Image (cartoon, rainbow, N blue to C red):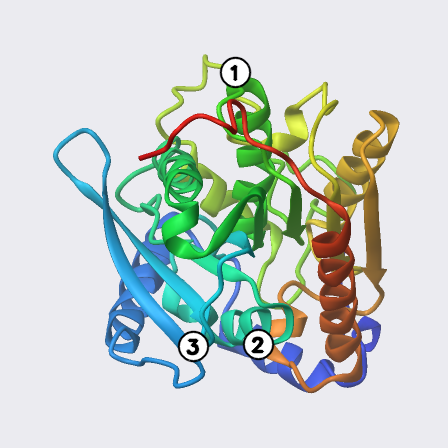
């Protein structure tokens, strides 16, 4: 799907053209370089502490002698019964840190009162699948077990993320359903990265800004390189491969009309609905991947954020999921 400048939303076009000039069609080697540069900048951002949020940092034992860093962002006012939102950052599985989404945390905490739990999951440049998903599941169980300590109600644990974070959200929902150890009240996988096959019209030969088909293929190769080609890609690595989505939590998602993820997101939404899962879904024509984050003042970006916030408020009033053995002591 070839993307011309004229196809872009008028308020996104200048940034889209600039992104194309900055580079595209990145190889695995190039993605490793980009990951290192961005990682250095994000580590510097760790010193920033937003004045409008309480921030706590914790280390969770992975069971192999290493620890998973988790950052918790809470409203300034103490809470005892907030929703707990496990937020999984984006970055194609190969880059990113929790600190990159401070703006999102502020909006979530200030406007909805959520407590945000953001794991610093392992990245594919050093740790391919299933390391990131294992970390996210570890963080989800930790959020459940520490709900009272964090001011979270146990029956309203949710998961959300964008791009690769959206893919991890969808994967985590499948994994939690199948292991039956923790219940997720609702999920928000925003323009999720869920299909390694890249066989849809929107994913084939897409040259949109920021994320094109070649770059996407390189990102998937980094993430799945532990699979030797004879192994079937697990549904927990690429949730679009899942045939049975019954029992997954209520879902909200949206996607840009020009990005590679458009068609796979549509197919995922259709599959959820066919399995009886409640879904709210929107497509934003003329929008490339990450449009709302890179051009937040565009009218279409504002509409997307308003829609996200509106659904989240609805979910907080509507969706609850008691935990298995909810009455047992979690000392």
Among all residues in the image, which is located at the extreme left? 65
Query: Looking at the image, can residue 174 be seen?
Result: yes
Nearer-N-terminus badge (1/2) = 2
User: Residue 110's mark?
Assistant: 2
Q: In the figure, 189 relative to 108: above or below?
A: above
Nearer-N-terminus badge (3/2) = 3
* Viewer-side label of 1, 3: 3
Which element is circle 1 on?
loop
The residue located at (41%, 36%) in the rendering is 141
Residue 153 position within the rendered picture, expressed as x and y whole percent measured from the top left: 54, 48
The residue located at (79%, 83%) in the rendering is 299
Which element is circle 2 on?
helix
User: Residue 255's mark?
Assistant: none
Drawn side of residue 193 relative to residue 54, left or right: right
User: Residue 53's mark?
Assistant: 3
Query: Looking at the image, can residue 94 be seen?
Result: no
**Tag count:** 3
Q: Nearer the viewer, residue 199 or 49?
A: 49
**Crowding near the residue tagged with mark 2, few <14, some 14–19, many ≥20 C-alpha atoms within 10 Å:** some
Residue 172 position within the rendered picture, expressed as x and y whole percent measured from the top left: 53, 35
**Crowding near the residue tagged with mark 3, few <14, some 14–19, many ≥20 C-alpha atoms within 10 Å:** some
Q: Quadrant of residue 246?
A: top right
Drawn side of residue 233 relative to residue 261, left or right: left
Residue 222 position within the rendered picture, expressed as x and y whole percent measured from the top left: 39, 41
């Amino acid at each position: 799907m070839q993307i011309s400048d004229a196809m872009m939303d008028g308020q996104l076009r200048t940034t889209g053209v600039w992104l194309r000039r900055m580079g595209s069609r990145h190889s695995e080697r190039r993605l490793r370089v980009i990951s290192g540069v961005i990682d250095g900048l994000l580590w510097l951002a760790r010193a920033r502490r937003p004045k409008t949020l309480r921030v706590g940092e914790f280390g969770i034992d992975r069971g192999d002698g290493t620890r998973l860093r988790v950052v918790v962002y809470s409203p300034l006012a103490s809470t005892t019964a907030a929703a707990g939102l496990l937020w999984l950052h984006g970055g194609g599985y190969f880059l990113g840190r929790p600190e990159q989404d401070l703006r999102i945390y502020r909006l979530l905490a200030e406007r909805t009162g959520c407590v945000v739990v953001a794991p610093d999951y392992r990245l594919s440049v050093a740790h391919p699948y299933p390391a990131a998903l294992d970390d996210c599941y570890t963080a989800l169980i930790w959020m459940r077990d520490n709900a009272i300590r964090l001011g979270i109600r146990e029956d309203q644990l949710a998961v959300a993320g964008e791009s690769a974070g959206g893919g991890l959200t969808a994967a985590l929902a499948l994994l939690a359903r199948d292991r039956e150890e923790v219940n997720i009240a609702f999920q928000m996988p925003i323009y999720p990265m869920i299909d390694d096959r890249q066989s849809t019209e929107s994913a084939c030969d897409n040259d949109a800004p920021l994320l094109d088909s070649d770059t996407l293929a390189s990102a998937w190769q980094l993430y799945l390189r532990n699979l030797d080609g004879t192994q079937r890609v697990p549904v927990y690595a690429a949730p679009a491969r899942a045939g049975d989505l019954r029992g997954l939590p209520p879902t909200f998602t949206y996607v840009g009309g020009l990005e590679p993820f458009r068609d796979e997101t549509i197919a995922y939404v259709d599959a959820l609905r066919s399995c009886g899962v409640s879904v709210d879904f929107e497509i934003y024509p003329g929008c490339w991947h990450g449009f709302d984050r890179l051009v937040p003042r565009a009218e279409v970006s504002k509409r997307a954020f308003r829609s996200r916030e509106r659904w989240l408020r609805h979910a907080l009033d509507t969706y609850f999921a008691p935990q298995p053995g909810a009455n047992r002591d979690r000392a």
